[in-house]
Amino acid sequence: MLASFPEFDGGLGFILGLPRSEQILRPEAQSNLDFLLDGAGALFRNCSEREGGRMADGPTSSGSGHTHALKSPTECQNAQKRFRARQKERMTCLEREVAEKKATFEQLAQENLLLRARATILEKVVNCRDEQLSIVQAFEERCRASPDAQSCFGTGSSNTVVNGTDAAHESFRKMKKEQVIPQYKAFLAEVSKYLLHCQYPCSDPTNPIVQQVTACVQRMGYILKHLVLLNPSLMRQLLLLNMETMQPGAAVESHWDSVVASLQLGAEQRADIMAVLELYYGLLGKVYDERKLIRAGLAQGVGTLESSATTFVARNDLAAEMELMEQLHANLAKEHSAHTLLNCFFMGKVLLPAQFAKVAVYSYPFFPDCLAVALAVARQENQTRGGGSGGMPGSARVPPRGGSGSAASGSGSGSLDSHHQHSH
């Protein structure tokens, strides 16, 4: 049928519409037009037969000297299958590459979200630390300016303060639990009355009841904030006390679970608590690792402190003992710093005023324990994810604590703390 066309010379010039002088077989044209259909619908392929790297010669219908043998339908079908297989393999490769890049993008996006959340947490923690430093620095500046250093650290009758702020700091440092507990109970009675009439979520700043709750929380928060920083020993006593019986006691985990349930925390609040808890345990892990080395050094020096009259402490040994005690004191200060950061963040940056009030009310007869509440949140999160209670962040790194170990507490492992207390 093709021979009936006068312009067809057996090459691709006819199909491309080229002049007769340019009607030669072009490799790129042949690669683009692999298959042709004849009038009857039969599938064939123009394949230039090459012998020894050159075109095979032979007569053609137009006498051009080039020959194009037609392959059989089976060979054409096989070629078509190979072509489709190559295309399918290429598509599979591209799809796999796209899937890998998509997974990488999602992973990087998740890491970016985590880093943003961590940056937000760190900004809040830095704000907490700045606030704490301002309180402590004001106290220390007054001490340096005082003609009598004992007015800051002594208990004698010479303790006299002129400035009003200095007087407040001094009063916080001297406070006893008998002074704090009545104020705290009065706060509970007042704020409970307002909470009964406060509709959830009790966060509308224009609501008079919310304003009353906020005012109560600010007054008590001011007291607790200064006690944590200026009188940590009192905070330790309060956290280990049952305020109903006025006897030492510690609440069980289920008590703090009930406290958390009353708060109705949002997803963002829970995420913040989990993030700061992980940061807290990261700091505390380093503190306890350092403390292990100090304990090992103290254990080696026990023999130098024997009470035998024939045993004398060498000057070098005594210097080493004193250096270890200074290191222990600094180590305990680091632990206390981590506790105060958790306390400030939890009470000042995560909870709304109404939630702060609920923590206080539902914790009674025990004092609010920020670490215990945060661990209760972590337990609930792990149970929700199916991880049980064993997956809390840092739980494997931190040794058992004596007492409830609040965020305001300066206590760590009990034996070391008692050793530290006896050393003073």
Image (spheres, rainbow, N blue to C red):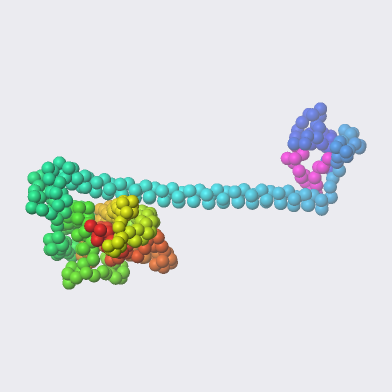
Task: Name the side, left or right, on which 156 lies relative to 264.
Answer: left
Quarter-of-image position of residue 263:
bottom left
Tell me what residue is drawn at x 23 percent, y 57 percent.
424
Between 399 and 71, which is closer to the camera in this rendering?
399
Q: Where residue 84 sits: x, y (%)?
A: 71, 50
Which residue is the extreme one toward the top? 21
Tell me what residue is drawn at x 36 percent, y 60 percent.
299
Whether residue 28 is situated above or below residue 379 in the rendered picture: above
Quarter-of-image position of residue 5:
top right
Tell me what residue is drawn at x 85 percent, y 41 percent.
49
Tell me what residue is drawn at x 89 percent, y 34 percent.
65
Between 193 and 303, which is closer to the camera in this rendering?
303
Residue 185 is a magenta residue: no
Q: Where residue 287 sits: x, y (%)?
A: 35, 55
Quarter-of-image position of residue 184:
bottom left
Whether residue 147 is situated above or below residue 216 in the rendered picture: above
Is residue 245 at least partly visible in the picture?
yes
Q: Which residues are magenta?
A: 29-48
Between 297 and 108, which is closer to the camera in this rendering?
297
Task: Name the side, left or right, on which 174 lies relative to 18.
Answer: left
